[in-house]
Amino acid sequence: MDDQLNDIVTRETETTKDILTLLADMGQTFAATQDIEASLQYAVEHIAKYVGAEAGSLFMLDDDETHLYCHACYGDVDIVGVEIGADQGIVGHCVQNIATEIVRDVTNDTRFHQGVDDESGFVTRSILCAPLSVKGNCIGAIELINKSSGDGLFDTSDLTLLSTLASSAALAIVNARMAEKLVEQERVARELELAAEIQRSLLPSGNEGLPVWGSNIPARTVSGDFFDYFELEDGRIVFNLGDVSGKGMNAALLMAKTSSLFRCLSKTIEHPGRLLGRINTEICETSTRGMFVTMVGGIFDPTTGRLRIANAGHEPPLVRDVQGNYRAIAAEAPPLGIVDDFSWENGFPVTTIDLDGGAFYLFTDGVTEGYVEDGVELGVDGVQKIIDESSTESINLQLERIVASVFGSGIALRDDLTVLGIADDLLKRPVSEDNDPTVGEKAVGDASHRQQFASLTTNSSPERLRMIRSMVTDGAKSLGFSNEVIQDLILAVDEACQNVIRYAYGGKHDGTMEIVLFSDEDNLIIEVRDQAPHVDPATIKPRDLDDVRPGGLGTHLMNQVMNSVEYLPLSEEGGNILRMIKIIS
Amino acid sequence: MKSETREESGALIISFEGDIDLQSSPEARKALLEAVGKGMAVLVDLSAVDYIDSSGVASLVESFQKAKTEHHKFILVSVSDSARRVLELARLDKVFTICGSISDALEA
């Protein structure tokens, strides 16, 4: 050992300047590289030349560490691309043991793997091999073959020299690989930032003059939450807020899709339930399994304070009345993207709420489950407390306070934070129009003290429609409805009867049709009953309004003029019952 | 329902009176399509219409589309309040050309 050391020291003294230069150059080559393969080539060439070998090759372990690949070589025979098992031959041995190997004379060593020579035609006599390892982590090995001077055989001093050079090369390679990863990470981060920018552009940018406001703060770069609102030509406001399951890029993409579908379809489908039903169908058709969206979509009329929403599996929104009482509107439909049931084609359930000067708050679970300063979850109670404390302020400020309580707590966000609020301003009511002092979604029509005050049973013939219209006119007059409203009621009943004649009885005139009028304190309830086979309400769905063609219009008209239109659950006796409700003002 | 068609200043004027409902709309549809088939501008006078339902509106839409593809004018004239209400509910008030009087329509 002392002899070897002396030998190296002697050689080192002679060539110290050279080896330092080589090490420095190699380090620099790797540090500056855009191309690790070229640097590997540089390393193997210079190391082979420096040690004085006829040939050299650099093998690296593949990702699953089962094979060694030749990435660079020096000498007459090109073996770049050659693949051997991770434990094959001298190189494999060296890598497995993370130890240098010397085979002074291959003819005396059984570990020598003849395969590469057979493939390359090279005659191997003597081998040196040193692992490329950093801190016990081996990434490959450098092998040198046949000393180019003397007897052509390597000695141990050559091995020690190679070992030194290999260590330094290994460090340079590992560093270069890390740098490459960092560059890749930065590229991904830049792309995420671009994606986030596109996402932000999908959110509304301001609320000039509108009584609605929203905010979204992603927990990561991109968000799985979204909200949107915009004003229709007639002044009504369409809005939504949703939460895609999961976080990250896949959630962000589904968010972009869902909010785009909403924005596009909401311009032609005004009924929030049918709108969400339609989006559900679209998402079910193409969505990745296991991903879903909870969402509330709705429409608000500032001139009446009336809000209509459909809730697909989302956390219940809050309604706060002017007295400060809260009501939560629970979801009546599953999240979007789970099941495409035909029965929803006619619409998810819709809840009608009259804000009457109150406000409406929508948020994602990132808000209610977000940590506030003391490390506890904000909760729905916490949200209500903040609203109560700031109820005299604008909706923007109220929501900002909610967001700040979680975002400003100093604790990292667990989930995206998204809020949306609508404030109903009684001053926005048109002066001349009488407001509907309505009962919202109070179980209209189901009241036990309702009274039947008119009914008519007739055959399913178009000739009878005139008679039905005059019966409805008389009935509605007795309840004090205005002439304009009576016109609407006539239209709705007439259209309902047409559906019975055309669809339930298929145009046959000998079926039975019964029209019954009830009233309770607040509502006129009209039921149209038939004895026909069950009708799937989805087959009488209203048309989209941009679809200018004959037909499919009746159901749309009924929905337009009545406060509620629904088919009652099918009864044992058969037949269909359509119940329509008009609130008495 | 009653309907009457007359020609005036190179246009066909078709006037309806009474209720256009499921019972009468086939007749209204026939009259409208016949008028459109003549290859002239068609003016539909709805001033005396007391009631129109979706089947009546559908007949108007069908005739309007036919006139449009054949590049003839199809104008609704003096639409009664109740007919206008239904067109508005159907959001069709922006689809049709609507004029206040026959003379306006002839100039349109």
Image (cartoon, coloured by chain):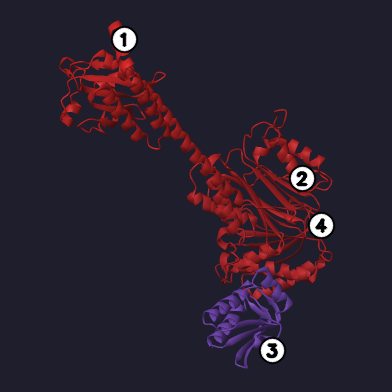
Colour for chain B in the figure: purple
Is residue A560 left or right of B71 when viewed as pictured? right
Amino acid beneath label 3: Ser
Q: Is tag 2's residue or tag 4's residue first in the polypeptide sequence?
A: 2
Q: CA distance from mark 2 to mark 3?
A: 57 Å
Disc 3: which residue: B103
Left or right: A541, with A158 as reference point: right
Q: Quadrant of the C terminus of chain A?
A: bottom right
Tell me the SS state at disc 2.
Answer: helix
Do pointers 4 and 1 mark residues of a single chain? Answer: yes
Q: Quadrant of residue A40?
A: top left
Label 3 with label 1: CB-CB less than 8 Å: no
Q: Which residue is mark 1?
A: A5
Q: What residue would you read off at disc 2?
A: A397
Chain where mark 2 sits:
A
Q: Colour of chain A?
A: red
Quickly name the residue at label 4. Answer: A437
Note whether A254 is above or below A42 in the view shown: below
